[in-house]
Protein backbone atom coordinates (compact mmCIF):
# COMPACT_ATOMS: atom_id res chain seq x y z
CA UNK A 1 0.00 0.00 0.00
CA UNK A 2 1.24 3.48 -0.90
CA UNK A 3 2.22 5.72 2.00
CA UNK A 4 -0.12 8.56 2.92
CA UNK A 5 -0.06 11.42 0.43
CA UNK A 6 0.93 14.79 1.89
CA UNK A 7 -1.68 17.52 1.36
CA UNK A 8 -0.16 20.94 0.59
CA UNK A 9 -3.39 22.93 0.16
CA UNK A 10 -7.02 21.98 0.63
CA UNK A 11 -10.39 23.69 0.50
CA UNK A 12 -13.86 22.64 -0.61
CA UNK A 13 -13.03 23.19 -4.30
CA UNK A 14 -9.35 22.42 -4.90
CA UNK A 15 -6.64 20.15 -3.59
CA UNK A 16 -2.87 20.37 -4.06
CA UNK A 17 -0.82 17.36 -2.99
CA UNK A 18 2.78 16.18 -3.02
CA UNK A 19 3.11 13.28 -5.49
CA UNK A 20 6.00 10.96 -4.65
CA UNK A 21 8.20 9.64 -7.46
CA UNK A 22 7.21 6.20 -8.72
CA UNK A 23 3.48 6.78 -8.41
CA UNK A 24 1.23 7.28 -11.43
CA UNK A 25 -0.75 10.53 -11.38
CA UNK A 26 -3.90 8.91 -12.75
CA UNK A 27 -4.96 5.38 -13.78
CA UNK A 28 -3.27 4.64 -17.09
CA UNK A 29 -4.07 1.82 -19.55
CA UNK A 30 -1.33 -0.82 -19.79
CA UNK A 31 0.57 0.73 -16.85
CA UNK A 32 0.81 -1.31 -13.69
CA UNK A 33 0.96 0.08 -10.18
CA UNK A 34 -0.88 2.37 -7.83
CA UNK A 35 -1.95 5.88 -8.78
CA UNK A 36 -2.42 9.19 -7.01
CA UNK A 37 -6.19 9.37 -7.61
CA UNK A 38 -6.72 5.98 -5.95
CA UNK A 39 -4.36 6.80 -3.08
CA UNK A 40 -6.27 10.01 -2.34
CA UNK A 41 -9.60 8.20 -2.48
CA UNK A 42 -8.32 5.77 0.17
CA UNK A 43 -7.54 8.79 2.35
CA UNK A 44 -11.09 10.05 1.99
CA UNK A 45 -10.08 12.72 -0.51
CA UNK A 46 -11.82 11.96 -3.82
CA UNK A 47 -10.47 14.32 -6.46
CA UNK A 48 -10.47 14.92 -10.22
CA UNK A 49 -7.12 15.38 -11.98
CA UNK A 50 -6.61 18.50 -14.09
CA UNK A 51 -2.93 17.92 -14.88
CA UNK A 52 -0.37 15.24 -14.19
CA UNK A 53 3.31 14.55 -13.63
CA UNK A 54 5.39 11.75 -15.15
CA UNK A 55 5.60 8.66 -12.98
CA UNK A 56 9.26 9.35 -12.16
CA UNK A 57 8.65 13.01 -11.32
CA UNK A 58 7.69 14.22 -7.84
CA UNK A 59 6.01 17.36 -6.63
CA UNK A 60 2.87 19.47 -6.51
CA UNK A 61 -0.21 18.23 -8.37
CA UNK A 62 -3.43 20.24 -8.57
CA UNK A 63 -6.82 18.52 -8.34
CA UNK A 64 -10.42 19.68 -8.60
CA UNK A 65 -12.94 18.43 -6.06
CA UNK A 66 -15.97 18.69 -8.37
CA UNK A 67 -16.72 18.73 -12.09
CA UNK A 68 -17.47 22.47 -12.28
CA UNK A 69 -14.13 23.30 -10.67
CA UNK A 70 -12.38 20.90 -13.04
CA UNK A 71 -13.82 22.75 -16.05
CA UNK A 72 -12.76 26.13 -14.64
CA UNK A 73 -9.23 24.94 -13.90
CA UNK A 74 -8.90 23.37 -17.33
CA UNK A 75 -9.83 26.73 -18.84
CA UNK A 76 -7.16 28.37 -16.66
CA UNK A 77 -4.58 25.89 -17.97
CA UNK A 78 -5.58 26.61 -21.57
CA UNK A 79 -5.25 30.35 -20.90
CA UNK A 80 -1.77 29.80 -19.37
CA UNK A 81 -3.05 31.27 -16.10
CA UNK A 82 -1.59 28.36 -14.11
CA UNK A 83 2.12 28.73 -13.42
CA UNK A 84 4.14 25.57 -12.81
CA UNK A 85 7.75 25.87 -11.69
CA UNK A 86 10.17 22.96 -11.41
CA UNK A 87 13.54 22.23 -9.84
CA UNK A 88 15.84 20.20 -12.08
CA UNK A 89 19.41 18.93 -12.13
CA UNK A 90 20.84 18.70 -15.64
CA UNK A 91 24.07 17.15 -16.80
CA UNK A 92 26.91 19.48 -17.79
CA UNK A 93 27.56 23.20 -17.40
CA UNK A 94 25.53 25.99 -19.01
CA UNK A 95 27.12 28.96 -20.75
CA UNK A 96 24.25 31.34 -20.00
CA UNK A 97 22.40 32.25 -16.83
CA UNK A 98 18.99 31.71 -18.41
CA UNK A 99 17.35 30.75 -21.67
CA UNK A 100 14.32 29.43 -23.53
CA UNK A 101 13.83 26.21 -25.49
CA UNK A 102 11.10 26.20 -28.16
CA UNK A 103 11.54 22.94 -30.07
CA UNK A 104 8.13 21.57 -31.17
CA UNK A 105 7.06 18.28 -29.62
CA UNK A 106 5.13 15.49 -31.32
CA UNK A 107 3.16 13.34 -28.88
CA UNK A 108 2.91 9.76 -30.13
CA UNK A 109 0.92 7.57 -27.75
CA UNK A 110 2.90 7.12 -24.52
CA UNK A 111 6.00 8.62 -26.12
CA UNK A 112 7.02 12.04 -27.40
CA UNK A 113 9.82 13.43 -29.54
CA UNK A 114 11.16 16.65 -31.00
CA UNK A 115 9.66 17.06 -34.47
CA UNK A 116 9.09 19.86 -36.97
CA UNK A 117 5.48 18.68 -37.28
CA UNK A 118 4.95 18.71 -33.51
CA UNK A 119 3.06 21.23 -31.38
CA UNK A 120 4.61 24.51 -30.29
CA UNK A 121 6.42 24.09 -26.96
CA UNK A 122 8.20 26.54 -24.69
CA UNK A 123 10.42 25.87 -21.67
CA UNK A 124 12.10 28.72 -19.78
CA UNK A 125 15.03 28.04 -17.49
CA UNK A 126 17.29 29.87 -15.03
CA UNK A 127 20.53 28.56 -13.55
CA UNK A 128 20.36 28.32 -9.76
CA UNK A 129 23.80 26.83 -9.15
CA UNK A 130 26.57 25.37 -11.29
CA UNK A 131 28.52 22.31 -10.13
CA UNK A 132 31.50 20.46 -11.58
CA UNK A 133 29.47 18.08 -13.73
CA UNK A 134 25.86 19.23 -13.37
CA UNK A 135 23.71 22.35 -13.13
CA UNK A 136 20.82 23.09 -10.80
CA UNK A 137 17.96 24.84 -12.59
CA UNK A 138 14.62 26.49 -12.03
CA UNK A 139 12.32 25.65 -14.95
CA UNK A 140 9.05 27.33 -15.93
CA UNK A 141 6.67 25.56 -18.30
CA UNK A 142 4.85 27.89 -20.69
CA UNK A 143 3.26 24.93 -22.47
CA UNK A 144 2.64 21.47 -21.06
CA UNK A 145 3.52 18.85 -23.65
CA UNK A 146 4.27 15.27 -22.67
CA UNK A 147 7.79 14.90 -21.20
CA UNK A 148 8.49 18.49 -22.32
CA UNK A 149 11.21 19.42 -19.84
CA UNK A 150 12.96 16.08 -20.21
CA UNK A 151 12.85 16.23 -24.01
CA UNK A 152 14.01 19.82 -24.31
CA UNK A 153 17.02 19.43 -22.03
CA UNK A 154 18.05 16.14 -23.65
CA UNK A 155 17.78 17.73 -27.10
CA UNK A 156 19.95 20.62 -25.89
CA UNK A 157 22.66 18.15 -24.89
CA UNK A 158 21.93 18.48 -21.19
CA UNK A 159 19.76 15.50 -20.25
CA UNK A 160 18.50 15.58 -16.70
CA UNK A 161 20.43 13.60 -14.11
CA UNK A 162 18.81 10.17 -13.80
CA UNK A 163 17.24 10.42 -17.26
CA UNK A 164 16.97 7.01 -18.93
CA UNK A 165 14.22 7.48 -21.47
CA UNK A 166 15.74 10.35 -23.44
CA UNK A 167 19.45 10.36 -22.50
CA UNK A 168 21.05 8.75 -25.52
CA UNK A 169 24.66 7.54 -25.57
CA UNK A 170 25.83 10.59 -27.46
CA UNK A 171 24.82 12.84 -24.56
CA UNK A 172 28.03 12.04 -22.75
CA UNK A 173 29.19 10.46 -19.55
CA UNK A 174 26.91 10.57 -16.52
CA UNK A 175 28.91 11.94 -13.58
CA UNK A 176 26.06 12.32 -11.07
CA UNK A 177 23.72 9.39 -10.54
CA UNK A 178 20.11 9.27 -9.42
CA UNK A 179 17.63 6.43 -9.03
CA UNK A 180 15.11 8.46 -11.04
CA UNK A 181 14.94 11.61 -13.13
CA UNK A 182 16.04 14.67 -11.13
CA UNK A 183 12.91 16.74 -11.68
CA UNK A 184 10.49 18.07 -9.06
CA UNK A 185 7.44 20.34 -9.34
CA UNK A 186 8.23 22.62 -6.41
CA UNK A 187 5.71 25.43 -7.00
CA UNK A 188 2.26 25.87 -8.52
CA UNK A 189 0.30 29.12 -8.73
CA UNK A 190 -3.25 29.48 -9.99
CA UNK A 191 -6.34 31.70 -9.78
CA UNK A 192 -8.82 30.12 -7.38
CA UNK A 193 -11.73 28.81 -9.46
CA UNK A 194 -14.33 30.43 -7.19
CA UNK A 195 -12.74 33.64 -5.90
CA UNK A 196 -10.09 34.33 -8.60
CA UNK A 197 -7.67 35.00 -5.73
CA UNK A 198 -4.13 33.87 -6.58
CA UNK A 199 -3.19 30.68 -4.75
CA UNK A 200 0.54 29.91 -4.44
CA UNK A 201 1.70 26.52 -3.14
CA UNK A 202 5.25 25.27 -2.59
CA UNK A 203 6.43 21.68 -2.33
CA UNK A 204 9.89 21.08 -0.76
CA UNK A 205 12.47 18.85 -2.43
CA UNK A 206 12.21 15.21 -1.28
CA UNK A 207 15.11 13.43 0.43
CA UNK A 208 16.30 11.56 -2.67
CA UNK A 209 16.76 14.78 -4.65
CA UNK A 210 18.44 16.49 -1.71
CA UNK A 211 20.93 13.61 -1.90
CA UNK A 212 21.42 14.23 -5.63
CA UNK A 213 22.07 17.91 -4.92
CA UNK A 214 24.63 17.01 -2.22
CA UNK A 215 26.35 14.57 -4.60
CA UNK A 216 26.61 17.28 -7.27
CA UNK A 217 28.07 19.72 -4.75
CA UNK A 218 30.70 17.18 -3.63
CA UNK A 219 31.74 16.10 -7.14
CA UNK A 220 35.09 17.27 -8.46
Image (spheres, rainbow, N blue to C red):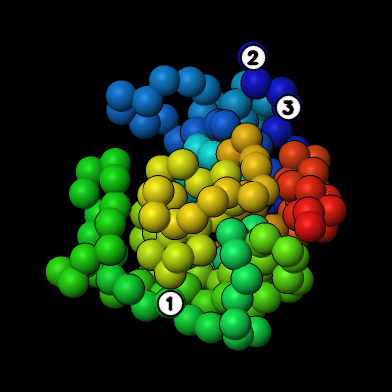
Q: Is residue 87 left or right of residue 113?
A: right
Q: Residue placed at 66% from the left, 27% from the top? A: 44
Work out whether residue 66 can be spotted.
no
Instruction: Tell which circle, 3 or 1, labels the residue nearer the N-terminal end.
Output: 3
Where 24 falls versus 32 (above or below)?
Answer: below
Q: Residue placed at 48% from the left, 20% from the top? A: 33
Residue lying farthest to the top in this orientation:
1
Where 38 falls versus 128 (above or below)?
Answer: above
Residue underneath mark 2: 1
Q: Secondary structure at mark 2?
A: loop
Answer few, some or many: residues within 10 Å of disc 1's Cα (few below 14, many 20 plus, some between 14 and 19). some
Q: Residue placed at 55% from the left, 55% from the top? A: 160
On-image quarter of the C terminus:
bottom right
Residue underneath mark 1: 101
Report the Cα–Cα distance between label 3 and label 1.
36 Å
Q: Position of residue 135 (x, y in %)?
A: 67, 66
Q: Position of residue 145 (x, y in %)?
A: 36, 61
Residue 19, numbered label: none
Q: Residue placed at 73% from the left, 64% from the top? A: 132
Q: Secondary structure at mark 1?
A: strand
Residue 4, numbered label: 3
Where 82 falls versus 97 (above or below)?
Answer: above
Amino acid sequence: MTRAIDVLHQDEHVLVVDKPAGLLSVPTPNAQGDDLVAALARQGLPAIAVHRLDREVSGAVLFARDATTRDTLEQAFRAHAVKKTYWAMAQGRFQRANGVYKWPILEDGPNARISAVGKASETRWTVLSGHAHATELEVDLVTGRRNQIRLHFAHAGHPLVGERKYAFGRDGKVHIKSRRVALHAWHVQFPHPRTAEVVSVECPLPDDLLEVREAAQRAR
